[in-house]
Image: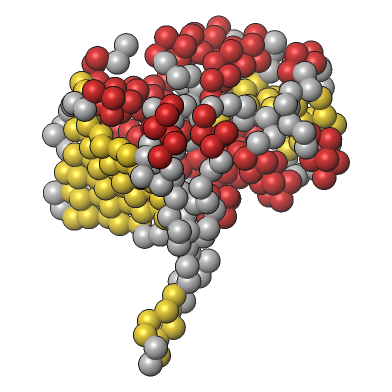
Amino acid sequence: MINIALVGIGRIGLVHAHTIKTKLSSEVNLSLFVDSMSKDLENKAKEYNTKYSRSFDECLNDKTIDAVLLCTPTNTHTESCIKALKSGKHVFCEKPIATNIEDHLKVIEASKKSDKKLMVGFNRRFDHNYKNIKERIYAGEIGKIQMIKLTNYDSPFPNVEFLKTSGGIYLDLCIHDLDLISFLTDKNGDEPVELFTWGSAFLMPELAEFGDVDTAIVSVKMKSGAIANINTTRFANYGYDQRAEVLGTKGSLESRNDTPTNVILQNERGVIGDKPFYTFLDRYENAYAEEIKQFVESIINDKDVPVNAQDCLPALKMALAANISLKENRIVKIDEIK
């Protein structure tokens, strides 16, 4: 049994708490909630039958805690990762671990110097659809990749206060898709070379006040010549929409949006099926459980984590390139990001 402290009980923190409680209670003891700001900390701790603290330092000094699960605002990840590793804790940190390359490299260096595990939370890598697509690509079923199309429509719309500290749509929402590009194309060492994006604050114009958008398209050119396109938005009124299509020289692979069932009703009114899952928790609940399970197994069996800090560097470079592309309205070479 691994004792984990959950640091940050906001939206994503409570997703992990729910997943651990409902799916991993025999493997993980959620022994402490830590949040310096939440007004709901005591109530949530009671709900999950755990201790609570306002102090991250107190958590790190607690010898009964084996690992920390960092779900704090994006701009705190670098310092918290390094501090936790130095204190002798294993670390699972939600993506991204940094908002610039210099800080990301600092975390990589801290991880190399530590004998503790550091895993980054890119949960799409653990989703049944995306894993199956990758396995089939690796098996050569569609030949050489020509094009990738990813759809990522969020739901419900996050609150503005969260968005102000999220790092923006490319570092927060779209970075999942940018990481998927790396995940699906890494077989032969392919890598992104240039990127362009269009974006607008279409749904919430006030996002433009702090340089963010809620609707975007990202195009990425790979070293191999393959092209990847991402369509993303902060809100789709019909639910959480996640799709992927990969075209290769010998065929194509497609994952459609998941729904509670795949039952279709056909009658005089038409063809009727289930609406998609409405939130990311419903859609990716099993993927969240699987990534924490593998993190815990890495600790118990002293093996490499499935997603380390180095693995995530290409996604960060693409996200930062997208920020520049949006601001300057130009194609950005990935080599520019240092």
| Residue found at x 69% / y 46% | 18
Residue 106, percent across and down?
48, 9
Closest to the observer: 157 or 71?
Answer: 157
What residue is shown at x 34% (from left), y 49% (from top)? 151
Q: Name the residue rendered at 22%, 55% in the picture.
A: 252
How many numbered marks, from 0 up?
0
Locate residue 313, reporting x and y percent. 39, 22
Taking 280 as reference, is 261 above or below it?
Answer: below
**Above/below status of 238 relative to 32:** below
Q: For residue 25, which quarter of the picture?
A: top right
Q: What is the quadrant of the N terminus in the image?
A: top right
The chosen color scheme is secondary structure
Q: In this view, does 46 lie to the left or right of 291?
A: right
Residue 292 seen in render: yes
Question: In the rendered image, is residue 137 in sight?
Answer: no
Image position, residue 187 (x, y; %):
28, 34
